[in-house]
Amino acid sequence: MPDAEVYYEPTFFSKEESNRYFNELQQQVGWQQEHIRMFGRQVAMPRLTAWYGDKGYTYSGLQNEPKPWLPLLLELKQAVELRTGNHYNSVLLNYYRQGSDSMGWHADNEPELGQNPSIASLSFGGTRRFGFRQRQNKEQKNHYLTLQHGSLLLMQGPTQHFWQHSIPKTATAVEPRINLTFRFVY
Ligand SMILES: O=C(O)CCC(=O)C(=O)O
Ligand SMILES: [Fe+2]
């Protein structure tokens, strides 16, 4: 992909480790149903979310106060930091309960994330497609990755300036999926 720096490691964690992480995250994380204002109405987000970390930040127009780190999340953060060589101080978690849960096209380009944010994303549970599309040139063909159980996806460099990403809805039966995106918030 031009103007992007994306790495994907399909088996960052073993199947056994990944099963354990999925179960522990499902049980321990304080999952919340957030709403977004759309055309003057409150609409439930098509997924559950949670935010842990050192510092608050605005996401999709929501001002979120982070919850204090759980040992489990610090363990995952450390593994991701060792592998990527970057430092993170917050994690946004997404719980996609079924195929109709999704995330629309966006770039993680909030000013608090700095100029060229490094975003490290872990996936556990059902596999889902992850799309990339160019922000300027939407005629260019999109790229898709299938994010596996226990995988690590790293987006950094200029990626968020030039590309948007999404988790499309799917009509196929899929297992629930948990995603964690580690970020550094200034
Ligand atoms: O679920 C995913 O893999 C994507 C999550 C994402 O893009 C985000 O939280 O900003
Ligand atoms: Fe994102």
Image (spheres, helix red, strand yellow):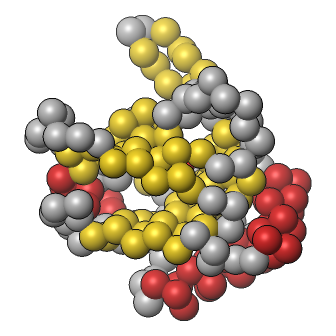
Residue 79 percent location from the top left of the image = 63, 84
| Residue at the far top in the pictured view | 40
Look at 36% across and 36% down and name the residue there: 105
Q: Residue at the far left: name it.
A: 136
Q: Residue at x 50, y 25 (%)?
A: 36
Residue 161 found in image quarter? bottom left
Q: Residue at x 74, y 53 (%)?
A: 125
Q: Residue at x 48, y 76 (%)?
A: 88
Residue 89 visible in rendering:
no
Q: How many marks?
A: 0
- The x, y position of residue 6, in whole percent, is 34, 68
| Residue 28 percent coordinates (x, y) | 84, 58
Q: Is residue 126 placed above or below 154 in the rendered structure?
A: above
Viewer-side residue, 91 vs 85: 85
Question: Taking 77 as reference, is 107 above or below it?
Answer: above
- 61 or 175: which is nearer to us? 175
What is the quadrant of residue 20 in the picture?
bottom right
Residue 8 versus residue 26: which sits nearer the camera?
8
**In the rendered view of the protein, which quadrant contains the C terminus?**
bottom left
Whether residue 96 is visible here, answered yes or no, is: yes
User: Position of 28 compared to 138: left or right?
Assistant: right
The picture quadrant where one finds residue 100 is: top right
Q: Is residue 1 left or right of residue 82?
A: left
- Expressed as whole percent of the image width and height from the top left, the position of residue 118 reads 36, 71
Q: As drawn, is 159 to the left or to the right of 85?
A: left
Assign the N terminus to one quadrant of the image: bottom left
